[in-house]
């Protein structure tokens, strides 16, 4: 056998073993045997780069090369489903379908609603060619390299499949993997993932596919699209997809009556707790694709499908103590520490208590038996107390602290706010590290190679005490630190240097002035084009700027009244950060031609990018909005505008304006 033939044979064999293990859950060789064969294939492929195959089993291990995700327009829009929470609403849906189909017989396909992150996979000639996230439903991110590391997603199909088709499903992190990942993060004192959905979504968007591979994501596929599907039945198509190598839930059922639908819902309301992955409801779909087409769509969702959401689970457990966390802006969050209890598939040991008013309203005492829920099965919260369980020895009443748990500064509570704050923003360690983490984030200074762990490491080593200290770091200072090689250190230093070109409005956002988000920073930068002018502005001047109210204005004035903040800004100016609009930006044409208009952008454009059009709208006094409503002035519509937005615009009588019309309007 030649090495070429050996490579082809190993690829086919390993594809089959992946399918046996991750889809059928019936491996026929040991993990060691599989790894040995995979290593042999890797060695052979390295010797024969001319035999490269984008869908080789070796692609499953991922790469440590980073690359930005490109945006892809969906061939078929990925619409969301309407949600319902009661059996009466399910009955209403069923009866509406019956009425719309004029009494024609129909079947309902009942499926588990997996709680992960949506994905769309495109196959050509039996090979995976593209994987795209849901995004905004019209466009999503191309995450093909990351998805190839998920072993339950086939790279190469077998059987009698269509030449070209799309299949959609859910990327999931199994409970067992989620628990292990959070245990590891807790040991490293990193922030924990709130739930498997967040963990799966965050993992899928990592730039390093080798880390994605290590996270052991899973996937279930649940909808087939294409021109030449094997059957009219949705259920039947998925059975075919399973035979081609896809992981399709074995728990799907066809219901022929409303009672059968309720039987399915009631069974899985309890039984879902035994599943290895998170579910938060049931999806009901009219089975016939012909009937689906006849039923059509509303502006937001298909008329032929609905999601029934399970009620939040509740558990009873003991409150042992209350601890307090300090956020980036100084806000103090109380956390209930509990006896471990199983809730919605995971072990809960902590729950948010939100603020002092919540604590007082609950009348909490240490040792109380408390009811814990997951709101939408995400973040645990205490919703009540079993007062009957209180004995004669009532524990100490929980009272909100009056000093910062980190720096002992007396807390303040601003008028009209529920939260308490630590005002020591320049010397309180969690606030310092939090501000640095915000400063380096993608939407702010976008400094690659730095994260919470690295910031903490540099802070603990005394290398940084504020954001300006980042610019004094040298590769030699950090190369010898834990998990920090020379190559990584050089990359970080280069990225820090590159951030000096980040425009003024993003630097303003990066400073972390309380209440100044991305939009407010942009409005401020356009109205007051330098940091020096901003520092001298009073509340009244600031309030005259669009969308800048009393609270934001007062926060900006307070920020610049702080001597430490003024010194920090001076250092950043000396370092060379963009703390004023460039002349080109200031000279850009401006007008009030769009003043008072709310504009939605939709579709693909040829003369400017979407971001450039957003900028033009703001420069001429308009307001960018993301969703269509009766208050929308018009839609700037490009090619491939989503059908749901087009339909809603027609329903509301909102004008569609093309590129040429828009550019003429502002000229």
Image: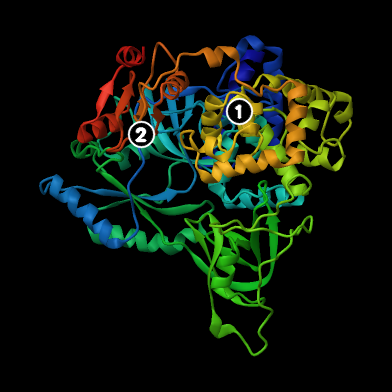
In the picture of the structure, the residue carrying the numbered disc 2 is: 224
Q: Earlier in the sequence, mark 1 or mark 2?
A: 2
Q: Is residue 634 above or below residue 554?
A: above
Q: Is residue 188 above or below residue 144?
A: below
Quadrant location of the C terminus in the rendered image:
top left
In the picture of the structure, the residue carrying the numbered disc 1 is: 506
Q: Residue at x 65, y 62 (%)?
A: 335
- Choose between 361 and 341: the one closer to the eye: 361
Label 1 neighbourhood size at 10 Å, few (<14), some (14-19), many (20+)? many
Q: Residue furthest top?
A: 50
Q: Quadrant of residue 137?
A: top left
The x and y percentages for residue 19 are: 53, 36
Left or right relative to 286: residue 408: right
Q: Is residue 480 above or below residue 172?
A: above
Residue 107, disc:
none
The x and y percentages for residue 568 are: 76, 33
- Choose between 345 and 96: the one closer to the eye: 96
Q: Quadrant of residue 125?
A: top left
Mark 1 to mark 2 CA distance (whole Å): 42 Å
Circles 1 and 2, Cβ within 8 Å, touching? The answer is: no
Mark 1 or mark 2, which is nearer to you?
Answer: 1
Q: Residue at x 31, y 26 (%)?
A: 635
The x and y percentages for residue 557 are: 63, 40
* One can see residue 160 in this view: no
Left or right relative to 643: residue 588: right
Q: Residue at x 30, y 38 (%)?
A: 629
């Amino acid at each position: 056998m030649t090495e070429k033939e050996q490579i082809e044979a190993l690829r086919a064999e390993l594809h089959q073993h992946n399918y046996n293990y991750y889809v059928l859950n019936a491996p026929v060789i040991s993990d060691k045997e599989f790894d040995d064969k995979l290593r042999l294939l890797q060695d052979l492929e390295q010797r024969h780069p001319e035999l490269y195959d984008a869908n080789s089993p070796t692609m499953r291990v991922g790469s440590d090369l980073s690359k930005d995700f490109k945006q892809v327009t969906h061939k078929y829009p990925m619409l969301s489903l309407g949600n319902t929470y009661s059996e009466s609403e399910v009955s209403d849906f069923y009866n509406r379908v019956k009425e719309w189909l004029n009494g024609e017989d129909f079947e309902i396909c009942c499926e588990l609603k997996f709680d992960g992150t949506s994905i769309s996979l495109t196959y050509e000639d039996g090979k995976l060619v593209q994987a795209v996230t849901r995004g905004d439903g019209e466009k999503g991110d191309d995450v093909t390299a990351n998805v190839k590391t998920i072993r339950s997603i086939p790279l190469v199909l077998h059987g009698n499949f269509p030449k070209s088709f799309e299949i959609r499903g859910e990327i999931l992190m199994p409970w067992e993997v989620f628990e292990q990942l959070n245990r590891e993060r807790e040991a490293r004192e990193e922030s924990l993932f709130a739930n498997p959905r967040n963990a799966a979504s965050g993992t899928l968007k990592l730039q390093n596919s080798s880390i994605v591979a290590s996270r052991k994501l899973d996937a279930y596929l649940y909808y087939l699209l294409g021109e030449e599907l094997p059957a009219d039945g949705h259920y039947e198509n998925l059975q075919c997809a399973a035979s081609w190598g896809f992981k399709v839930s074995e728990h799907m059922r066809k219901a022929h009556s409303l009672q059968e639908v309720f039987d399915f819902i009631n069974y899985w309301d309890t039984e879902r707790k035994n599943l290895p992955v998170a579910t938060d409801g049931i999806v009901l779909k009219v089975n016939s694709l012909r009937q689906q087409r006849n039923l059509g769509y509303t502006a937001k969702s298909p008329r032929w499908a609905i999601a029934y959401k399970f009620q939040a689970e509740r558990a009873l457990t003991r409150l042992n103590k209350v601890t307090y966390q300090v956020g980036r802006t100084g806000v103090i969050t109380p956390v209930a520490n509990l006896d471990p209890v199983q809730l919605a598939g995971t072990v809960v040991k902590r729950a948010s208590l939100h603020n002092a008013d919540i604590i007082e309203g609950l009348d909490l005492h240490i040792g109380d038996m408390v009811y814990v829920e997951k709101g939408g099965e995400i973040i645990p919260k205490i919703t009540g107390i079993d007062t009957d369980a209180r004995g004669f020895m009532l524990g100490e009443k929980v009272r909100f602290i009056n000093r910062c748990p980190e720096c002992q500064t007396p807390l303040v509570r601003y008028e009209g706010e529920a939260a308490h704050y630590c005002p020591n923003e320049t010397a309180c360690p969690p606030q310092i590290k939090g501000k640095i983490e915000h400063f380096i984030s993608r939407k702010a200074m976008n400094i690659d190679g730095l994260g919470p762990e690295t910031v903490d490491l540099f802070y603990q080593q005394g290398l940084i005490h504020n954001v300006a200290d980042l610019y004094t770091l040298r590769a030699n200072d950090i190369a010898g630190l834990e998990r920090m090689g020379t190559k990584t250190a050089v990359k970080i230093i280069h990225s820090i240097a590159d951030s000096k070109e980040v425009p003024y409005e993003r630097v303003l956002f990066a400073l972390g002035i309380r209440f100044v988000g991305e939009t407010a920073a942009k409005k401020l930068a356009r109205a007051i084009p330098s940091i020096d002018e901003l520092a001298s502005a009073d509340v009244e001047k600031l309030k005259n700027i669009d969308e800048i109210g009393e609270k934001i204005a007062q926060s900006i004035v307070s920020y610049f009244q702080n001597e430490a903040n003024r010194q920090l800004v001076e250092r950043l100016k000396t370092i060379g950060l963009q703390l004023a609009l460039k002349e080109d930006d200031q000279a850009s044409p401006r007008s009030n031609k769009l003043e008072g208009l709310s504009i939605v952008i939709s579709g693909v454009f040829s003369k400017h990018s979407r971001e450039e059009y957003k900028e033009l709208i703001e420069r001429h006094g308009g307001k960018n909005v993301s969703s269509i409503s009766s208050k929308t002035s018009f839609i700037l519509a490009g090619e491939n505008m989503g059908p749901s937005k087009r339909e809603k615009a027609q329903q509301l009588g909102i004008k569609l304006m093309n590129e040429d019309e828009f550019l003429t309007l502002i000229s």
